[in-house]
Image: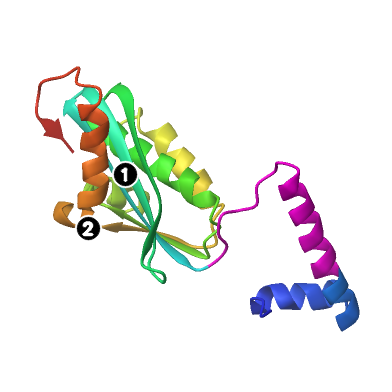
Amino acid sequence: MDLPSSLERRLQKAFPRESERERFVVDTLEEALAQSSEGESLPEGIGGTLHLFTDGGSRGNPGQAGIGCVLVDPSQGITLKEHAECIGIETNNVAEYRALIAGLQMALAYQPNRLICHLDSELVVKQLNGEYRVKMSTLQPLVDQIKELAMQFPDVVFQHIPREDNWRADELVNKALDANPISHKGLNH
């Protein structure tokens, strides 16, 4: 099995003999598999680049809000996981941030080497990339939570995409809101 060079170097430093390294890897895998059979689950996937599409919206601003997240493995061309949820009465900006938080939490189990987050909210992307200041104090805790989650990934990128390219996450937002039809106003996001 080929390991990332940085990990290989750390193993060589900790275990100079190849036989010791191999024994450590085998022992570690056996322990993880034993824990898995005892009810603890292993990560669903490890490594690679994954794409996360998130969207949040509210019907009224503030109004009944929903979030949608889609995690995609582009190398296999498959959707790994989707999530849709109503989050109560919120603004569309809070919904956008909450969607990204849920998506990052969802992606953690897959331990990607690189996570590319696609959002159709230019404001959120520019705030997270440091191009815009976060002026609303109510958003700062959400920004802080995203930054804390992002530190758990080796590499995270926040990219703005046109709304029409985020149709799957948008569809999940509408699905969540349609399942909880409290508001009759148009969708904002």
- Element carrying mark 2: loop
Q: Position of residue 121 (x, y in %)?
A: 23, 47
> Start and end of the magenta stretch?
24-47
Q: Farthest residue in the top direction?
A: 182
Q: Where 128 sits versus 141, above or below?
A: below
Q: Nearer the viewer, residue 79 or 136?
A: 79
* Residue 182 shows up from this direction: yes
> Quadrant of the rendered structure where residue 170 is?
top left
Q: Residues within 10 Å of mark 1 (few under 14, many from 20)?
A: few
Q: Is residue 63 left or right of residue 131?
A: left
Q: Earlier in the sequence, mark 2 or mark 1?
A: 1
Q: Position of residue 164 (x, y in %)?
A: 14, 54
Q: Nearer the viewer, residue 185 or 6?
A: 185
Q: Nearer the viewer, residue 141 or 12?
A: 12
- Element carrying mark 1: loop
Instruction: Determine the CA span between mark 2 and mark 1.
Output: 20 Å
Indicate the quadrant containing the N terminus: top left, top right, bottom left or bottom right: bottom right
Q: Residue at x 50, y 68 (%)?
A: 48
Q: Residue at x 70, y 43 (%)?
A: 40
* Residue 91 shows up from this direction: no
Q: Is residue 132 left or right of residue 141?
A: left
Circle on res. 161: 2
Q: Farthest residue in the front direction?
A: 37
* Residue holding disc 1: 133
Indicate the quadrant containing the C terminus: top left, top right, bottom left or bottom right: top left
Q: Nearer the viewer, residue 64 or 134?
A: 64
